[in-house]
Image (cartoon, coloured by chain):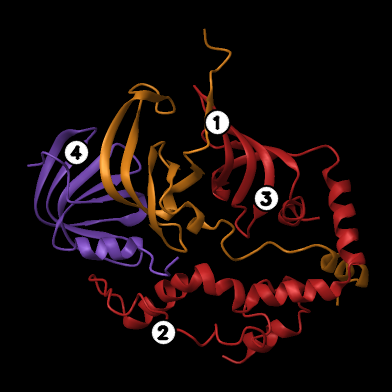
Amino acid sequence: MSEPSNQHQKRKFEGPKREAIINLGKYTDKHVRVKLMGGRLVVGVLKGYDQLMNLVLDETVEYMRDEEDDTVIKKDSTRELGLVVMRGTMLLTLSPADGSECIVNPHLE
Amino acid sequence: MSGVEILPLEIIDKTVGQPVWVMLTSHREFAGTLVGFDDFVNVVLEDVVEYDRDSEVKRHAGKMLLSGNNIALLVPGGKPDAQ
Amino acid sequence: MLPLYLLTNSNGQHMLIELKNGDTVQGQLTNVDNWMNLTLADVTHTASNEVITLPEIYVRGNFIKYIKLQQDVIEKVKQSSAQQQSQGHHQNRDFRRRQGGGGNRRDNDRRFNQGGNQKRNEGRGSHYNGGNRRYNNQRQSNDGNHSSAMGGFVQHHQTSAQQPASLGHN
């Protein structure tokens, strides 16, 4: 048995959770902005999802990246994809597309 | 709210037999007919056109097993203006 | 203190996350899971050429390069856990049970049960059988909201006695 104080300490703190920490139900039928591994940025209406965070997006728009530098998104360059399935394994960030505000980068002039 | 949700894997299931456009994490894309897939979304395609950033690289006749490891997006219906 | 424990107990704290692609995300932590996936609120997300504010964001754990925490984070965590303790470990027990039992799982995770377990039972064909999938046939672990002790989740807090019992009899 490990020291009583260690066990005692472990009980004090909550352990990490093993269930979904985000409820995608609240984003259903809303626009979401999703970053994918490899640098793709995609915005679409969330229509469905599963526990592995595979997503079904409708009216999906992909924002194209700069040819030279993959990390730079060309804001005016998009292509429409319609209804897509997005793999949860490739999902990097997810955020609502409504309610987001773009701040002009003060460093760019 | 009803409990009926749209499951991503069901959409893929419905696409079996239809044209599909598969996009990898890189700029590579594959457009072909979806023959089948598995739990990991490894995908079998038929008569595939391989693209790199919208320009056609190669045509593959017959069946192809595409590893799910790098698949980012699947678009039922295939690539517009394909083939 | 293990990193994941530290994070899990710093809900509400402000932090800066740098991602592997160089983007930064600043905000208040709202949730953490076993894989260090995070949800944050009141977020500022800075990419190479733009800055964007968001009410919420979900960040995948394995895409995080590092997290900058507040200087006094350890103090705050100890304080908040001391508060929890004073409210009684009675509460903690309920919390753990809820994690393992049916309550929370039922809502969102119904699909997970079907997707993961049921498909494997049917065997892996290349053609996915969508037939039964929609309805939750798997009631076995969801039935007892309470009685299935831990349900396999978060066994850290249990004494080690439980685990060997299940491992030993295979």
* Residue B81, x across and y down, in percent: 10, 38
Tell me if A63 is positioned left or right of A94 in this view: left
Sequence order check, earlier mark of 3 and 2: 3
- Residue B49 figure quarter: top left
Determine whether C81 is above or below A1 in the image. above
| Comparing labels 3 and 1, the label whose residue is closer to the camera | 3
Q: Which chain is purple?
A: B
The residue at which mark 3 appears reads as: C30
Q: Are marks 3 and 4 in contact (CB under 8 Å)?
A: no
Q: Which chain is disc 1 placed on?
A: C
Q: Residue at x 49, y 43 (%)?
A: A96
Sequence order check, earlier mark of 3 and 1: 1
Q: Which chain is disc 4 placed on?
A: B
The colour chain C appears in is red
> Do the residues at discs 4 and 2 belong to one chain?
no
The residue at which mark 4 appears reads as: B51
| Comparing labels 4 and 2, the label whose residue is closer to the camera | 2
Q: Which chain is orange?
A: A
The residue at which mark 2 appears reads as: C137
